[in-house]
């Protein structure tokens, strides 16, 4: 969501007493993930491995965007009983309609499809959502919906406290047997499609024990007080809605860019491994963590409904190292103090976030920029992704994604090279206190050491290292190139005007919104 929009309207919202009330949740029936799916094609495919690893979860990382797209399409095509998808953003672009079509085709085969979308980013999708929802085997619900559909910003003015809290969770589960969890939303930029800027990101495939917990999380949100039947807001589909949607599917597939993208996806090695049931899985302990849905409607600053304390407890206190990747890194005063305390005790703390030039949320960067000097003085190592890092990421075997140019979007961190988190949680105030989040804490030295290796060898080449000047008074940015180190005295590849904007925002009382 646009964080600038959120904090600019906050002051006005406090002055307005009117409230746009939600309609009663009529037509909503509680449903749950299907349990009798062992006999499905996916259930039979994973049964031997699951049986050989009781209580464990099979994990496979998906740093490549083509692989991440292919997995979703393939498990949707293989599903025989159910598909459950939950997303913060679902764009109406090529990838968005290709995945809509995958859900539609599954429904045509008799698969029950439940699609839960946060409503903040559904602008322009109401006709498609109405058409999908009208299918007898598809139900769409909108999370924390916006009452004013045509003037969405007005919802912040009339109902700011509620609307400012969003569902940031991301999961895709087929037949309650295979789940995909991670940082990717649904859109071209998350899956290496189209010609625009792409995001470096990370998902994981999960089979086994954790899948039932992912479904439990989905059911909690699907049946929550904040999930409304889509028809209450987008209206009923017209008589030609299904035909129009199918025409959009055909047009998307006929588009030359879509055709080229789908061909690239077909060439992904993971396709072959999945179809031949040769996909390598790491069998280990994995714990699903998520916010309670009560966080969305909380007006009393409760802490018992928050994911963050559970996440910290499950990951454990770092003894040797903490490697953290977050596109929107806003540690706040308490987080800065905690990271500084770790570094001062000898824990190696390394952070990779977006540079100002690479960030798609300049206001968020202001919340991070004001904390850099304190973190560096304590011994925390800071790296900021270069906007031109796409080439290096594309060529890297341990990459988080690929594109001609890249912004960081992965949310992951590893403790002591043994445990790793992959999910939707940003290390910022919004994820901690306002939005709902989810993810997997995985006991995986393999993945944790892969992240450490990224910091050891590749991050210094694809990111600027931020340092203090010898007198400790100023910051410098170091870029490593084939010809040696290059030093910058201001945020690289940014204008004077943009830097002044960030300076101004950093002194405003908006950190709690970022």
Image (spheres, grey):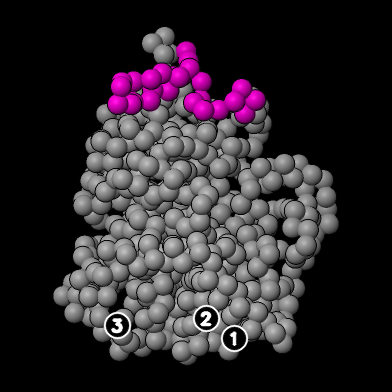
Residue identifier under label 2:
104
Residue ID at (74%, 58%): 152
What percent of the width, then of the height, locates residue 401? 38, 51
16, 71: nearer the viewer: 71
Residue ID at (64%, 64%): 122
- Give the distance between the C-alpha atoms of the residues marked 2 and 3, in whole angstroms: 21 Å
- In this view, 413 is above or below 48: above
Quarter assignment of residue 12: top right
What percent of the width, then of the height, locates residue 420? 30, 51
Span of residues in magenta: 473-499
What percent of the width, then of the height, locates residue 365? 55, 35
Residue ID at (68%, 74%): 127
Q: Is residue 483 left or right of residue 193?
A: left
- In this view, 313 is above or below 52: above
Residue identifier under label 3:
43
Tell which tag, 2 or 3, sits nearer the viewer.
Answer: 2
- Give the distance between the C-alpha atoms of the residues marked 1 and 2, in whole angstroms: 8 Å
């Amino acid at each position: 969501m646009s964080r600038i929009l959120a904090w600019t309207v906050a002051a006005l919202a406090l002055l307005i007493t009117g409230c746009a009330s939600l309609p009663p949740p009529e037509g909503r029936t509680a449903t749950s993930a299907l349990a009798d799916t062992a006999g499905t094609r996916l259930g039979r495919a994973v049964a031997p491995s699951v049986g050989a690893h009781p209580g464990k979860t099979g994990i496979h990382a998906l740093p490549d965007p083509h692989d991440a797209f292919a997995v979703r399409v393939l498990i949707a095509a293989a599903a025989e009983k159910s598909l459950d998808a939950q997303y913060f953003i679902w764009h109406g672009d090529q990838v968005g309609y290709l995945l809509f079509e995958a859900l539609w085709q599954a429904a045509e085969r008799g698969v029950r499809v439940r699609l839960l979308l946060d409503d903040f980013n559904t602008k322009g999708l109401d006709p498609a959502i109405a058409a999908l929802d009208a299918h007898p085997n598809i139900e769409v619900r909108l999370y924390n919906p916006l009452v004013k559909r045509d003037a969405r910003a007005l919802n912040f003015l009339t109902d700011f406290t509620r609307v400012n809290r969003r569902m940031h969770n991301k999961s895709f589960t087929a037949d309650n047997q295979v789940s995909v969890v991670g940082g990717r939303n649904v859109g071209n930029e998350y899956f290496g499609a189209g010609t625009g800027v792409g995001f470096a990101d990370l998902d994981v495939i999960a089979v086994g024990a954790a899948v039932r917990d992912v479904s439990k999380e989905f059911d909690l949100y699907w049946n929550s007080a904040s999930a409304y039947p889509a028809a209450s807001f987008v209206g009923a589909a017209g008589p030609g809605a299904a035909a129009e949607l199918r025409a959009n599917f055909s047009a998307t597939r006929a588009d030359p860019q879509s055709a080229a993208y789908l061909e690239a996806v077909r060439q992904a090695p993971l396709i072959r491994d999945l179809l031949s049931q040769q996909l390598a899985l790491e069998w280990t302990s994995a714990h699903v963590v998520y916010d309670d849905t009560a966080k969305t409607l909380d007006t009393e600053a409760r802490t018992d409904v928050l994911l963050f304390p559970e996440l910290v407890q499950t990951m454990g206190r770092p003894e040797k190292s903490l490697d953290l990747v977050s596109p929107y890194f806003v540690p706040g005063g308490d987080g800065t103090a905690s990271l500084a305390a770790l570094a001062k005790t000898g824990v190696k703390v390394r952070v990779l976030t977006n540079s100002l030039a690479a960030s798609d949320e300049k206001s968020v960067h202001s919340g991070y920029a004001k904390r850099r000097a304190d973190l560096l003085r304590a011994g925390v190592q800071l790296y900021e992704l270069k906007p031109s890092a796409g080439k290096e990421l594309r060529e890297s075997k341990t990459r988080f994604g690929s594109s001609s140019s890249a912004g960081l979007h992965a949310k992951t961190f590893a403790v002591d090279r043994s445990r790793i988190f992959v999910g939707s949680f940003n290390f910022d105030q919004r994820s901690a206190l306002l939005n709902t989040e989810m993810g997997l804490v995985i006991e995986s030295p393999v993945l944790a050491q892969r992240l450490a290796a990224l910091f050891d060898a590749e991050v210094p080449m694809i990111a600027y290292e931020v340092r203090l000047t010898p007198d400790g008074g100023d910051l410098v940015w170091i870029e490593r190139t084939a010809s040696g180190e290059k030093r910058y005295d201001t945020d690289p590849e940014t204008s004077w005007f943009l830097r002044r904007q960030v300076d101004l925002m950093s002194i405003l009382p908006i950190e709690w919104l970022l």
